[in-house]
Each structure stands twice: as C-alpha cells, then as structure tokens.
Image (cartoon, rainbow, N blue to C red):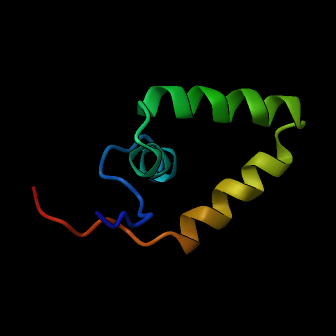
Amino acid sequence: MYKKLTRSRNRIIAGVCGGLAEFLGWDPTIVRVLYIVVSLISVAFPGLIAYLILWFVMPDDNTAF
C-alpha cells in the first residue's frame, strides 16, 4: 500500500513527529524522544529549523476518524 508523509492528528505541537512515526511504522513517543536527543546533541538550533520547515512543508492529515 502507498504511504503518504503527512502531519498526524496524534500531535503535541504540529504533528510532525507523529506523522514521521506513522510513515515509518514506529511508536510516536520513540520518534519524539529521538528528535529531542538529536536536537540537543546538535545544539538544538538545526533541529528547530528542521521542525519548522517540516511543519510548513508536510501537508496536514485530512482523513476523518
């Protein structure tokens, strides 16, 4: 089946990490923790920029539950 990368409705801020988790088939908590760890290791600024870019580039999940 074809998977589309979209922002998730399972969101804390914008649904970026939740969308990545759904696309990869991972638990959203693991993706969020990995994002925080990688952001802190890279002095947080590049991670913040990447999150903001993905927030605007990734389409919202428009499927109804």
Residue 62: quadrant of the picture: bottom left
The quarter of the image holding the N terminus is: bottom left
Q: Residue furthest right?
A: 43
Q: Position of residue 14 (x, y in %)?
A: 46, 53
Name the residue at 9% across, 55% down.
65
Q: Position of residue 39 (x, y in %)?
A: 77, 36
Relative to 35, 17 lies left or right: left
Q: Position of residue 23 (x, y in %)?
A: 43, 52
Query: Please, is residue 3 above or below residue 27 in the view?
Result: below
Query: Please, is residue 25 above or below residue 5 in the view?
Result: above
Relative to 17, 61 lies left or right: left
Relative to 15, 37 lies left or right: right
Query: Please, is residue 29 above or below residue 44 in the view?
Result: above
Q: Residue furthest left?
A: 65
Name the residue at 60% across, 63% down.
54
Name the residue at 37% across, 68% down.
60
Please count the marks in the image: 0
Q: Position of residue 3 (x, y in %)?
A: 36, 63
Name the residue at 83% across, 50% down.
46
Q: Residue furthest front?
A: 1
Relative to 40, 64 lies left or right: left
Q: Of residues 25 and 39, which is closer to you in this image?
A: 25
Residue 31: quadrant of the picture: top right
Q: Of residues 27 and 58, which is closer to you in this image?
A: 27
